[in-house]
Amino acid sequence: MRASTDPSVATAERYRAFAKVEARGMSVCYERWAAGVAADPATMALIDQLPAVKRQPNLVFSAARLHGAVVGEYPQFAAWLREHWSDVAATCLTHATQTNEPGRCAVLLPALAALAGPLAIIEVGASAGLCLHPDRYSYRYRLADGDERMLHPTDGPSPVVLDCAVTGPVPLPERMPKIVWRAGIDLHPLDVHSDADLAWLEALIWPEHDDRRSRLRAAVAVARQEPVQIVTGDLNDQIEALIARAPAEATVVVFHTAVLAYLNEPDRNRFAAQMTRLPVRWLSNEGQSVVPGVLERLAEAPALSSAFILALDGEPIALTQPHGRALHWLG
């Protein structure tokens, strides 16, 4: 589990780790805010009023921006937070970090397309289900030699175009995988038809990532055309029954990205055991120490501590940028 999401870690260390590992190079604003919080006892005292599981930087910062916090330097943010703390705290208590980044489909697609089809896909921690439409998006894979490979849905280009830089022997697909059934599980599913839910999804996108905001809106329009059932409940409790509902002739693929970090160790181990026992292919895209046994199976640790590991049935197959911007296939 990352320090920033681990409720057993002190608040200062959670924010310090978020600044150094997750935000650095990704968001100047969030790096400054997180470093500022870690050195500011007054702001930490406010955040420590929340239950430990609700103190994570991404949740607090997203709640603040939902209520109007302006992107900028830390002193101004700290003053704003003190004035609006009651609103921010209320949102933290009723919401969760449910980032639904369709860009992550770009790193999942080569693995999905390499599996024997047709496919029935199930996403755990599905949020609003935007990653359950990988075959409805267009992809621009940028190779190390400067070449580009485009892939479109079978009925033509999509309004959602996902860019991904690729290195290593990536098995880039020539056609979309055939997906015949799709479903998800989430503790609190978000509704693509709800303005309030969409406002929260936009608040979860980091300040400087305007491309992700535009892509989110386009992906929501796609998702509205093909509603997907997302079961409400705990992934460990719901997964076996949902797998049983998939078409018998399909290869069932259970996948998740940036989800298991929010489970405690016993629940992560329970989920991994279920994936081993049940008749599915298991595709995980998580932080390096999150999925039991995966990091240990790498020949060497990733150079970037922020990199995710993409694994199929517990075996690492690639390193990925957390929002799907880059994919390095392992030889």
Image: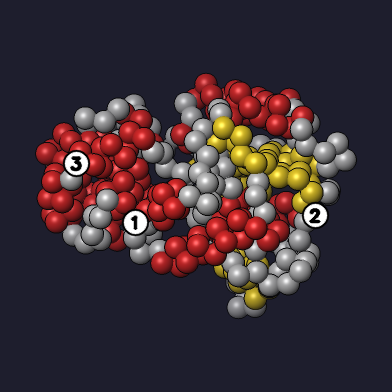
Res 276 → quadrant = top right
Residue placed under numbered mark 3 in the picture: 85
Q: CA distance from mark 1 to mark 2?
A: 38 Å
Residue 178 is marked as 2
3 or 2: mark nearer the eye: 3
Rendered position, 308 above or below 26: above
Type of residue at label 1?
Arg
* Res 148 seen here: yes
* Mark 1 or 2, nearer chain start: 1
Q: Is residue 220 above or below residue 273?
A: below
Which disc, if any, is residue 216? Answer: none
State the residue at coordinates (56%, 29%). Answer: 233
Q: Residue at x 60, y 56 (%)?
A: 224
Vertical relation: 147 (above or below) 30: below
Q: Disc 1 designates what residue?
A: 24
Q: Nearer the viewer, residue 315 or 252?
A: 252
The residue closer to the viewer here, 193 or 136, is 193
Instruction: Report the front residue among 126 and 320.
Output: 126
Q: Quick one: quadrant of the N terminus?
A: top left
Q: Amino acid at mark 2?
A: Lys
Quarter holding residue 42: top left
Dot 3 alpha-carbon crowd within 10 angstroms: few under 14, some 14 to 19, many 20 or more: some
| Element class at badge 3 | helix
Q: Position of residue 192 (x, y in %)?
A: 53, 51
Distance in Å between CA atoms under marks 3 and 2: 48 Å
Give how far across and how far down residue 45 sits, in percent: 16, 34
Frontmost of labels 1 and 2 is: 2
